[in-house]
Image (spheres, helix red, strand yellow):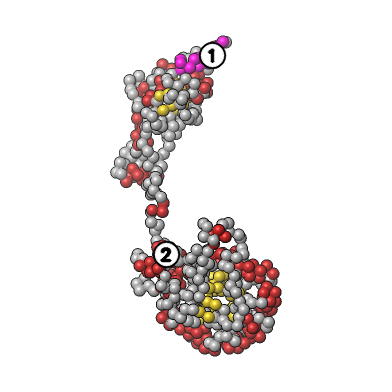
Amino acid sequence: RFRRTRRTRAAHLPVNTLRPSTMAQDGCQPMERFAFAKNGSAQKSWAFCPSSRAPEYNGGAHPPAGGVRGGTYEQRPYSVSGYVNGYNPSLPAYPPTRAQLEAQAKAARMPPGPGPTGGRSGEISEMMSRQVEYERARAAGVASHMPPPPGQDFSKLSESYNGGMSYSGHGAWDGPAPRGDPSKPAPGTPYYLKTPPEPVHDPSKEERTVPLGVGVDVGRLPTLGVDSAHAAKGLKLGYRHVRCGSASGDKNLIVAGAAIASCVASGVARESIFVSAKIAPGEMADPESACDAVLKELGVDKLDLLSIEWPVGGADAVRECWSKMEALVDSGKTAGVGLCNASVPMVESVCATCRIKPVVNEVEAHPLMAHRKLVGVCRRYGVVPVANAPLGMGANGSTSSVESIESSPLATHPKMAEAMAVTGEGKPPGQTPEQILARWSVQRGVPLVVDAGATDAVVDAVARCHDFRLLNAQKAAVDAMEPPPRVGGTRFVSPPPGVDFAFDDPFLGGVARPGLELEKAGLL
């Protein structure tokens, strides 16, 4: 197939300079290259070729009565298909692409920038220069031969048995293969074989807080937090979130309140310390009294967050407790209200009926229980997901099957050993499993709280997780720790004795996922 290019009525050379074996000024090619064709697109389009109107042909521009403009097809020395890709002298030359210039400069075939004559150098301009020399020689009546551009030597084309055209048994292109962009993988090379660059980590640009509230400013939640049991040490290390329990279940409230007061006395603004507390299941009927008890134990005037620790009693009980907590926001006793251990259906139910939306949903979240669906749903509702037990140890007021990070299945997982063995620039010396787990949560945008079961060494190690970034191979290894949906994840935290609470399926609610049931059954 030959492309008919756009042409202009450029000034033609004298008629006697038009010769059958040359290329016309309007870009039409010699008909000897199409001698094999009998009824192609070039023949049918002859009437639109400017060369067909030359006076030397029968009829010319104004054919006489009974004359046929352009004569017969065999009398025409030029076809309608002109040179393409910048070789048509009646069209502006296509400038070399950036990839061509870079590739030629790299191969030392041309110096970067303008050529010796002030223009560009390279394959394209060389071909154009030969074309100009050929036209000048033809105008001067000097015999000259202009070889066709690469891939356009149509004299070697032949008509195949099925009426089509072939070139030595394959396609008609006779030129070099396109080089493409040298900065990208070669053709046929999968992109994933090219190792992506490691992002440059700048601790000074690290986001250390996340905003709370949708349409209303409820403050900012620090990315790193500690349980009330570690309030004194955590505040000295730079933690700015003290997560407290309920007045009936947290025995460290007075100590945590003293640590907050000491930190404020040292010059830290009280507004920069985020203080959160919870309402125990037995306190849901009277959340105001529970909030007053926490404020009294801590010695503060206002909480930044008050959450339902275990949403028990059904949707009606949670809705009634929530309306009373909204009144605490109106009275100024707490800046925001939130949920803990809430599943996707619970989050959707509360957000559908509440007047003041929850700003936080604190759930157990770690690589063995990533809660990807719950995290996504919370973010769509403007609820910030917070990781409880991010290291696999229990929180204050709950029961855990793990006593230390060293015995946690997270630390002893084979993928954790693989992540620890990764080497590369940016990996801090002496990196520990708890740092990798904490950084994994921070890197996915989920704030975390170091639980009461952590040691002082763990609290100190997690405080430095803003100073580095997981390498790509480390992030991939930790992500691979997540079990398939049919397993459902591993929980290390369970409700305390006497609390009637059952965890929902982590894939329950939200938008239906096609094939999930088959995947759970192991059929996919």
The magenta region covers 66-76
Write down the quadrant of residue 94 in the picture.
Answer: top left
- Mark 2 vs 1, N-terminal side: 1
User: How far across and down, in percent of the image, does residue 317 sit?
Assistant: 68, 76
Q: Residues within 10 Å of mark 2 (few under 14, many from 20)?
A: some
Does 112 appear above or below 274?
A: above
Q: Is residue 90 magenta?
A: no
Residue found at the far left of this picture: 108
Q: Is residue 71 magenta?
A: yes
Decide which of 385, 402 is in the foreground and name it.
Answer: 402
Pointer 2 residue: 477
Q: Residues within 10 Å of mark 1 (few under 14, many from 20)?
A: some
Residue type indicated by callout 2: Ala
Report whether residue 54 is seen. no
- Residue drawn at point x = 51 percent, y = 68 percent: 489
> Mark 2: which secondary structure?
helix
- Mark 2 or mark 1: which is in front? 2
Pointer 1 residue: 68
